[in-house]
Amino acid sequence: MKARRVVITGLGILAPNGNGKDAYWDALIKGRSGIKKIASFDSSPFSTQIAGEVKDFNPCDYFDSKLVKRSGRFTHFGVAASKMAVSDSRIDLSTENRDRCGVCFGTTIGAENDIYESQHRRFLELGPKAVNRFTAPEFTPHVATGYICSELKITGPNSTLSSGCSTGLEVINWGFKMVRRGEVDVAVVGSSDAPIFPFAMSTFCALGILSKRNEAPEKASRPYDKGRDGMVISEGGAAVVIEELNHALERGATIYAEIVSYASTCDAQDVVRVDLSGQALVSAIEQALTFGKMRREEIDYICAHGNAIPSYDVSETNAFKTFFQKHAYKIPVSSIKSMTGQAYAAGGGFQVVATSLCLKNGFVTPTINLEMPDPLCDLDYVPLHSRRFPMGTALINSHSVGGTHAVLVLRKYSQE
């Protein structure tokens, strides 16, 4: 039996530099950063006082106010991004067999911050009877998936994944496999995180991985730049609608990209430190291209993890050079985290939405703030400005704490 082709037909996004695909794409192409001084709490005691917060977002525009009040910010991002993606796809779920539709959402932190922290504080100060009765379900990671199924009335397979910063690609793979195997015709998949809270920021600061460029927030995230001093934390949500190709064509859907393959591997060396050789990423790229029956020369563009942690950037560069060899110097590579920051689980989703739009529009997004390249990061990292570059195939990679590497390959849709 010939494998079913799988395509992306809807995009939803809430990012620090733009809500909705149009605003987000405009910001990316113009190199506009969403990194600012933290506005949601007093960050003055912290060594890092900047982050990528989602702005001008009212969850009540997407969600009943009573549910908004009791649920966490990561859930709000998830529901909103999913509804955006469904709306953008123009799919009428009321005419679909909802048992043949699936949902998979992912998160790294969930509602450990706004729900758990606030209720734990009430418990410590006022005792057990002060804890809200909805606390138990609301800070579990799966609650966002549950709300999305409920809001969209999707009754088919559903799951929640948590693979650190690789989660945003992992959920795409869930939908890809479910549709490809014929278990569902439509999948709404995505990821969200809301880690900008005092305790979470304390842990990131203690680990020493955040940039301290507090006086120049928009210049702080500097992947591959010689002067980079760490990543910038951010928040948000992203979702896509995935469909079987004929299902999409029959209803006249816009196709942003075709999903070709996915693979993941692990350094298996250390939970925090990265293997500078990049060998695990090399293996993941090789597996993804083998599954997709592709040659390395077919990769036209790489949307890289590029989180601006010095060792991570070097490891990634080494992996690209090892696998692609001479071709590595011909491939435009860029990091949108220079503009969005690192939104953990949502970060991979940001990349998928961006890359889908790159394929559709024939542009490569820039790596802003790359003013003086690190000599160890000597590839074409598309510095400062976007570039018109019609492409056929793009590779996305992400890296999670624990050593996980994920690789997703997308292709511009063709009837062939």
Image (spheres, rainbow, N blue to C red):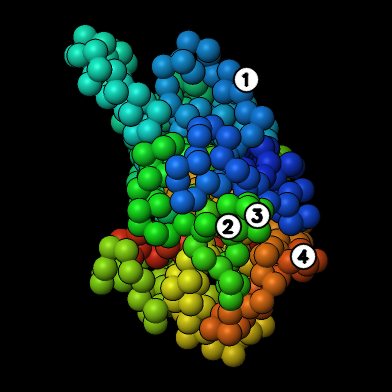
Residue position marked by numbered label 3 in the rendering: 216
x and y percent of residue 61 in the render?
A: 62, 20
Q: Which mark is in front, 1 or 4?
A: 4
Asked if the residue at tag 3 contacts the one at tag 2, i.e. Cβ–Cβ closer than 8 Å, the answer is: yes
Chain-order first, disc 1 or disc 4: 1
Secondary structure at badge 3 equals loop
Q: Which mark is in front, 3 or 4?
A: 3
Residue pictured at 46% horizontal, 51% vertical:
47
Disc 2 packing (10 Å; few <14; some 14–19; many ≥20): some
Residue position marked by numbered label 1 in the rendering: 61
Chain-order first, disc 3 or disc 4: 3
Asked if the residue at tag 4 contacts the one at tag 1, i.e. Cβ–Cβ closer than 8 Å, the answer is: no
Amino acid type, residue under disc 1 in the picture: Asp
Residue position marked by numbered label 4 in the rendering: 385
Amino acid type, residue under disc 3 in the picture: Ala
x and y percent of residue 286 in the render?
A: 44, 76
Of all residues, the one furthest to the bottom in this rendering is 326
